Amino acid sequence: MSILQTIKDKVRSRSIHVSYVDLGSCNGCDIEVLACLAPRYDIEQYGIYVHNNPREADVLIVIGAYTPGWQEKLTPLWEKIPDPKAAIAVGNCPISGCCFNRRGAYIDPPVSKHIPVAAEVPGCPPRPTEILAAILSVRDAVFANWEGRQR
Amino acid sequence: MAASIIWYLREFFRPGWLKKFLFAKTAPLTTPPYFRDFPEPTGKPCQHALFCMMVCPAPGAIDVVMEEDGWRPRIHKGHCIRCGLCVEACPNGVLRSGRILETRKAEGTAFIVTFRISIDPDLCTGCGNCATSCPVNKQLDPQIGAGGHSSNDEVIMRVLDGDVHVLHEEKCTGCKTCEVSCPTRAIQIARILEGTQQPQKGGGQ
Amino acid sequence: MKHTVDVNIPLGPVHPCFKEPARVKCETKGERIIAAEVELGYMKKGIERIMKGRPWQEVMFLAERVCGICSVIHNMVFIEAIEQVSGIAVPPRAAYLRVVANELDRMQSHLLANFSYCYTIEHETLGMYLLDLREKVMDVIERLTGARVTCAYIIPGGVRFDIGAQDEAFLRESLARIEDDLTRYTGMFESGPMIALRSRGIGILTKEAAMQAHAVGPTARASGISVDRRTEHPTYRQLGFEPVVRTECDNYARIMVRFGEVFQSIRLIRACLDNLPEGVIRGGGTCTAGETRYSGEAPRGELTYIIRTDDYGRVIDIQIQTPSIMNIEACCHVMIIGVDSVADVTSTFVSADPCIACTER
């Protein structure tokens, strides 16, 4: 691994831009992601910036159980994110459909059928600390030596 | 001008400031003890009452499985919503989550689960699938056949003259196997949950 | 009729200032908005459909998950509807504890709504102050119920957990601190000149228009309509409840109504704790057959459950009327029209506190 790569890894791991997309959840996980912004948890001290722009994001936080309204929208959204990228499924909904996964519901979980998911945070909703830990754990696995692995 | 630039440079290259700027982190946040986390086993033996599975509101969140030294409840993360109903419903205190077990003992609160069987006579074809598939029936009368006929009076339900008759509703464990195997959805199990409280004498809050 | 449209600007579904997916299509003439339309349909899960044929212990959790932000009130209204059907009496201590949980939930919901408004008008400092304050409220909720969001606190015939002496002291101490801080932040919002520029006189919803659009909750109360379902709730009546009403009709009034309601919630919780009766927290009782319509006041407005149950207490028919849909309609047909810039569209939309999850369910 070259020196340039080491520098790249270092810089990338301290500046992660997060975008979140709600595929039909109950809002509970939504506000827990939002609570990560609060001074108590302070997601920005780790260099993680939350803004909802997929074009400048590294990590996509997926919330919700994939409703039919997203069928033609989620994959283009995922493709808009520049490489290297990772998706994190937050909450039970994208993992299993949670309480909604019953006969007759308009949902199609799990989300990993539609986009590759790098990490899952179980819980309904998970605590902000758990979400934070998941983002931090993904950062090393996904962004380390990206160019080297591409070759 | 130059003095102020030097002042700034000195200020920002102070080791203390640099260290704080680069490495300052808030203390790691701990999960408070009263948070209802995923249920954990307390170590008490599971008596296979299955109340946890019967009250669980999330599909596929809890299973009671046979391990080498007995029955064990197993929580599936990703399905469990951490509601804590299983902890409150378990009569033996096998599971633990947050303060629920302690408050349950202190306040004398409990959930009582009862099961009621309802059969729609218009839909029932008398095929006997329910009586055959019922695991309690199978234990009580191993001879029970494909038609659901049984000469044993101890079974929960049996087919007699082309109709299903419910004999012992109180033996039902609420597993809903009959409901799944019924071709016309004529049989339905109601899981009735009641929250009760018997305050301890003397304490009582 | 032909009308001139300069640019058609769609906002969303993934947009920096919307927490949830909704699409606002604005027709603009210069910077002025002449028409707006909200496109929904990204969150439809069919909750009412999966609720059918289930007992209360499953429907309760689905009802909570209609809206994660105001979960306690969904829980409370559904359970009180079931209790009305089955004639289950609630012990007085449990009734007061329900009000405590409900008001705590209202506080955090209003603080979150005001945070998103401050964040949208780019006053991040005040927004972060409010979000930090919300964490204090969340701590109290967690202490009382054991979970931060979707806490499943209210069950037929009572509540799940009692409040101990230590918890009560913690709750009182937190309330004092929250009131202290909130007074300061409300002062900041009231007197901030930049906030006034972005809020006062923007997104006008007159009383007549609010009546016509059937606006509910803080949106209606900021337009001078004194409507609040809590005035009809027996426990709130005992506590002496009066709705907070303002007459400015703009974004500023809507935010100030929410601040006022947080102060009111603090007063209500204090009154509850002072008058907390002794006794049991669960009365028991099973659910039976019946049909009813029951309303309660969610943080966003009037919430109605129409339910029908069978002999064993299973829900066989349920309809939910959530508050946000009326406010969203009022917002896109009246409030947004005529605002001076596209930047004000998002802040006006957020000031109505839209909750897409409970709109679509």
Image (tube, rainbow, N blue to C red):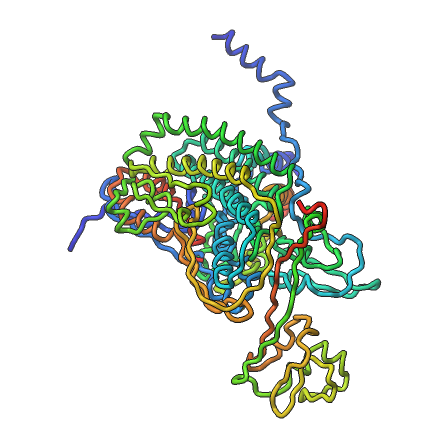
- In the image, B180 versus C210, the foreground residue is C210
- Asked if residue B75 is positioned above or below residue C16 in the image, the reply reads below
Indicate the position of residue C33 as horizontal and vertical percent values.
26, 43
Residue B166 in which image quadrant: bottom right
Residue pictured at 47% horizontal, 54% vertical: C77
Q: Quadrant of residue B186?
A: bottom right
Estimate the x, y position of residue C233 in percent, counting from the top left.
44, 49
| Residue B21 visible to an observer of this rendering | yes
Does C291 sit above or below residue C294?
A: below
Question: Compared to C237, does C133 lie above or below?
Answer: above
Compared across the picture, whether A150 is left or right of B202 comes to left
- Considering every residue shown, the one lying at the far right of the view is B69
What x and y, as percent, mark residue A45?
58, 32
| Number of on-image labels | 0
Extreme-front residue of the structure = B202
At a point 35% along the width and 50% down the height, the residue shown is C328
Outermost residue to the bottom: B161
Q: Residue at x 45, y 26 (%)?
A: C184
Q: Is residue B93 left or right of residue C328?
A: right
Quadrant of the drawing holding the N terminus of chain A = top right
- Do we see residue A79 in this rendering? no
User: In the depicted view, which residue is nearer to us: C153 or B82?
Assistant: C153
Residue drawn where x is 50% and y is 66% of the image: C315
- C280 or C346, which lies in front? C280
Answer left or right for A35 relative to B181: left
Q: Where residue B107 sits in the image (x, y, percent)?
A: 68, 49
User: Seen in the image, is C298 located left or right of residue B95?
Assistant: left
